[in-house]
Image: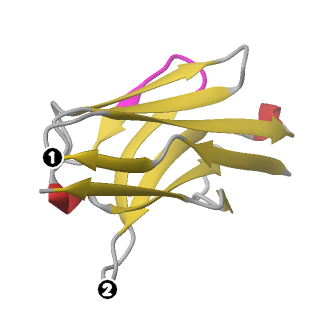
Amino acid sequence: QVQLVESGGGLVQAGGSLRLSCAASGRTFSSYALGWFRQAPGKEREFVAAIKWSGGGTDYADSVKGRFSISRDNVKKTVYLQMNSLKPEDTAVYYCASREIGRQYDVWGQGTQVTVSS
């Protein structure tokens, strides 16, 4: 089993930046990709970005393209989400999740709160 721990959330003004980290441990060799998701109060959880451990291929939600950047450090087994030009609508609990190849995301971190004030 893979374990995931997020960090880096906080309160920031609109237009500001934050960097989230997701540290993976355990059976990390089984993890094919790691994704970031977010859930705002009263809304469904939504996909934000994802990256493959091998090759580094990335994918982004349209709402964050050009503002967010996902990267990984294969030695530290850590994935980062650099969030720039933050907007109040980015306020949510951000979760990282891991999936094996050909499978859905099935391992989740505990989440980290991001609050963007206007």
Q: Is residue 56 left or right of residue 89?
A: right
Kindly indicate the quadrant of the structure image that contains residue 18: top left
Q: Give the amino acid at mark 1.
A: Ala
Observer-side mark, 1 or 2, equals 1
Residue 70 x, y percent position in the rendering:
40, 29
Most foreground residue, 102 or 78: 78
Majority SS type along the magenta span: loop
Q: Residue drawn 71% across and 25% down? A: 77
Q: Residue drawn 79% across and 35% down? A: 28
* Total numbered circles: 2
Asked if residue 32 can be seen in this view, the reply is no
Residue 23 x, y percent position in the rendering:
69, 36
Q: Is residue 23 left or right of residue 80?
A: right
Most foreground residue, 116 or 32: 116
Residue 108 x, y percent position in the rendering:
65, 59
Q: In the rendered structure, find residue 14 and report the number of the disc placed on it.
A: 1
Q: Is residue 55 magenta?
A: yes
The magenta segment: 53-58
Q: Is residue 50 magenta?
A: no
Q: Which residue is denoted by mark 2 in the rendering?
A: 42
Q: Residue drawn 16% across and 36% down? A: 85
Residue 13 x, y percent position in the rendering:
20, 46
Q: Residue drawn 58% across and 57% down? A: 105
